[in-house]
Image: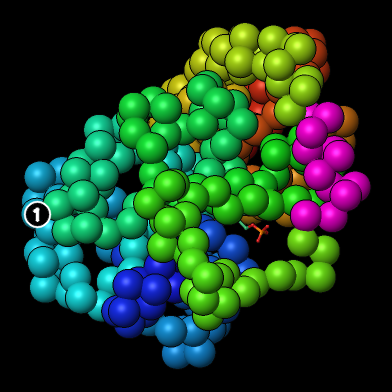
Amino acid sequence: MAVQFWMNHGERRTKFVSFKHGYHGDTFATMAICDPEEGMHRLFQGVVPQQFVVDIPSTPEKLEKLHGLLREKKSEIAAVVIEPLVQGAGGMKFHEAAVLCELKRLCAEHGLPLIFDEIFTGFGRTGTLFACEQAGITPDIMCLSKALSGGTMPLAATVASEKIYRAFLSDDADAALMHGPTYMAYALGCAAANASLDLFVSEPRLAQVAAIESQLTEELGRCRGLRGVVDVRVKGAIGVVQMDAPVESEKLRGRFAQMGCWIRPLGDVIYLTPPFVTKEQDLSALTAAIHSVLRVN
Ligand SMILES: Cc1ncc(COP(=O)(O)O)c(C=O)c1O
């Protein structure tokens, strides 16, 4: 959509700026914007097109470096894309909302569309309906999936601002976004999404997330000081125990399973992203399992 946005303006721009530790999916174009080293697609280096995968601009130096890249390569760049607030599959890494504000400012300065991949963060996961709200900004394009249908049916939506939409609004068929997967907007998935969104209104979803956040903060906090634990961080319904090195995922998974819990460590993090309707005692069972496994580790 971002590439064609430029084509419709008579420009050919094929590059994207994305961020280290990012994860955006397994198709060719999305593999190309994942972290090429730490991500899951190292095998495909040289197969997928090279993109500008840079540090999250969390310091003035990194921000200046990104600014330099945009200044230098602007005419090639179609858009900047980030998982806002939390980079999920790349290690549950958090950044400040201020980073997103800086990105918005830079993109505005260089006239570049800003894409938020809220596939993981959207629909309450970080404590607000969308992560972008915490920065008080609206991206030009937003990617949604996962909790759009409450995790019940596969469905995704790409949402565009008026500015992007207008670039496609034309009597010329070539200006249209001619992408239509076989099951696009299929009725069953849309019905599931509508039902899930109705429940967002009729049930106290964000209050549930806030309750999970305080419970995770308190209960996972007990892991601080255990051997190998270097950080415990929580945002919304995401709880992370950061280890000092990659864990033996399969072994730990087996021990969690023996305790009746399904917990899948990811590299050097052990994390929980519980469904928002998780009962207090069920969440406690999960946090207690993590604590007891790490205590004897
Ligand atoms: C932030 C983010 N973007 C994209 C994806 C990929 O989504 P899909 O598997 O639907 O292509 C994921 C999947 O985990 C994700 O977490």
- Kindly give the residue lying farthest to the bottom in the view shown: 46
Beta carbon of the mark 1 residue lies under 8 A of ligand 1: no
- The residue at which mark 1 appears reads as 64
Q: Residue at x 51, y 23 (%)?
A: 128
In-front residue for pair 221/195 = 195
Whether residue 192 appears in magenta in the rendering, the answer is: yes
| Residue 18: x %, y % from top left | 36, 62
- Kindly give the residue lying farthest to the front in the view shown: 171
Q: Is residue 9 above or below residue 185?
A: below
Q: Residue at x 74, y 70 (%)?
A: 181
| Residue 68: x %, y % from top left | 10, 64
Q: Is residue 51 above or below residue 82?
A: below
Q: How many marks?
A: 1
Of the four image quadrants, the one with ligand 1 is: bottom right
Given the image, on which type of amino acid does mark 1 rest? Glu
The answer to whether one can see residue 219 in this image is: no
- Quarter of the figure with the C terminus: top right
In-front residue for pair 39/146 = 146
The reply, left or right, for residue 2 in relation to residue 77 is right
Which residue range is magenta in the image? Answer: 185-196
Q: Residue at x 34, y 33 (%)?
A: 137
CA neighbours of label 1 inside 10 A, class few (<14), some (14 to 19), many (20+): few
- Kindly give the residue lying farthest to the right in the view shown: 188
Secondary element under disc 1, as helix, strand or loop, is helix
Whether residue 121 appears in magenta in the rendering, the answer is: no
Q: Locate residue 291: give its quadrant.
A: top right
Q: Is residue 113 above or below residue 236?
A: below
| Residue 140: x %, y % from top left | 39, 49
| Residue 45: x %, y % from top left | 46, 84
Q: Main secondary structure of the magenta part?
A: helix
The reply, left or right, for residue 53 in relation to residue 181 is left
